[in-house]
Image (cartoon, rainbow, N blue to C red):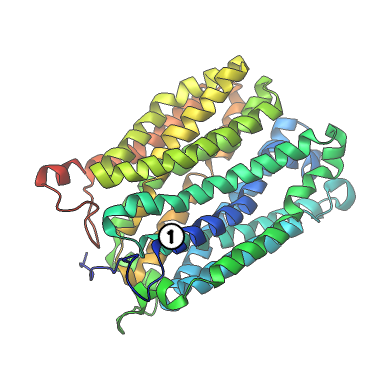
Amino acid sequence: MDDAATPRTADPASPGMPSARRYVVASVVGNALEWYDFFLYATAASIVFGQLFFPAVGDPLIATLASLAGLTVGFLARPFGGVVFGHIGDRFSRRSALVATLCMMGVATFLIGLLPTYATAGAWAPVLLVALRVVQGVAAGGEWGGAVLMISENVPAERRGFLSAWSQAGLALGFVLSSGVFLLTQLSMGEQAFLDWGWRIPFLISLAIVGVGAYIRFRIPTDQVGSESAHGAGRPRLPVVEVVRTHRRSLLLAMALRIAENGGAYIFLTFALAYGAHVGVPQELLLLGVMLSMTFAVGSMLLFGHLSDRIGRRPVYSGGALGLAVLAFPFFWMLDTTAPALVLLAFFLGNGVCHAAMIGVQPAYFTELFSPEVRYSGLSLAHELAAVLAGGLSPLIATALLAATGSSVPIALYVIGLAAITLIALLVSRHWSHGETTRPAPTAAAEDAR
């Protein structure tokens, strides 16, 4: 794999260059609003979509399985979005790609809120729902890489871990917003009113808030956001082809790193809602657990990002993956008790510690794996291909295992398997960088630890 030119990092004090804070704010706000839209489907699929769009299957658990299959279809569309918007971001403008993904997501989410249910439109209802989920998937596939690069390409290298983690904090805030709006909507009306029309409210308000994100992103100078790929005439005509040709090791490593993080996240965030309802945990408590744990994760992601600047990306990431494996069985045991304190503890450990340790380090780690001229495409392709294999399938596989066995044991073993893939990748790979080191003048011993 060829070395690339050292990427530029922004000096917040430099004249004529927007401060790092401006990029952080634009990434966090836009990310939060876009992922609010994307996570709404995941929440609704576990709570209401099975009853409203897939009632013909009869068994409530199988209906939930059908609605989660729609979640998986959306994941299948994400690599396509990563390729398309990665190409736009690498060849033309990071900003243009990010504004387009935000608008696509907002419109698709709003239209989901207008859909007729199965009782009104029959088989057309789930077909339209899944079609709009595909649009959401395409938009999400192009979002993450650009939002990460908005920060990581424009901040000092020695603080890249901490500042880049803010993009993931925006993602967590999106999940908190989606869970919070669902929870407040449920609490403010009766169960029947929520099923009849209340579930639409979180989707319909997305059209209003997407304008805020688009406005903020339009204010980021396009020549700065796309500056890494704007240098020289050496940009490849097809960045994604160049990624596969010259960055295969980086691509495979990034994908393997995503398996535990993304697969585990959708077990602890999405499937946990269905599992908790199955064992008798009140729905409001489950949503509260998700919301509070992800709020806590905002701070812990930043902490782990900062820690990665101090001791390296690899040790922090390894700790998160190992923690996921250790927690696999206890997580479901705590939900089985239905005791509020233990249910909340399960979510805090799973989302606020294990998941946060991995996802908080990801932006800086992945940025340093790809050279500037193909970085948007490389990040997006690795991120979204792994999302199909991990997050896209994990709720579906877990629900199928629960339906077949009635036990959490095979699900916990599945989570351990996800963690093992990432740990093996970390053990057999050494961190290699296409930019500055993550810490000033690291020693040889410190580099080995990474």
Compare residues 323 and 238 and report the one nearer the observer. Answer: 323
- The quarter of the picture where the C terminus appears is top left
Residue sitting at 83 percent across and 47 percent down?
A: 118
Residue sitting at 47 percent across and 28 percent down?
A: 349
Query: In the image, residue 232 lies at what x, y percent?
Result: 30, 83
Compare residues 271 and 290 and report the one nearer the observer. Answer: 290
Could you tell whether 31 is left or right of 367 in the image?
Answer: right
Could you tell whether 347 is left or right of 223 in the image?
Answer: right
For label 1, the residue is 21
Quadrant of the rendered structure where residue 279 is?
A: top right
Residue sitting at 29 percent across and 58 percent down?
A: 368
Residue that lies at the very extreme toward the right in this rendered image? 120
Query: Is 223 drawn above or below residue 355 in the view shown?
Result: below
Query: In the image, residue 183 lies at what x, y percent?
Result: 71, 36
Residue sitting at 60 percent across and 30 percent down?
A: 289
Query: In the image, residue 158 lies at what x, y percent?
Result: 26, 54
- The quarter of the picture where the N terminus appears is bottom left
Amino acid type at mark 1 = Arg
Could you tell whether 163 is left or right of 339 in the image?
Answer: left
Query: Is 433 drawn above or below residue 419 in the view shown?
Result: below
Residue 173 seen in the figure: yes
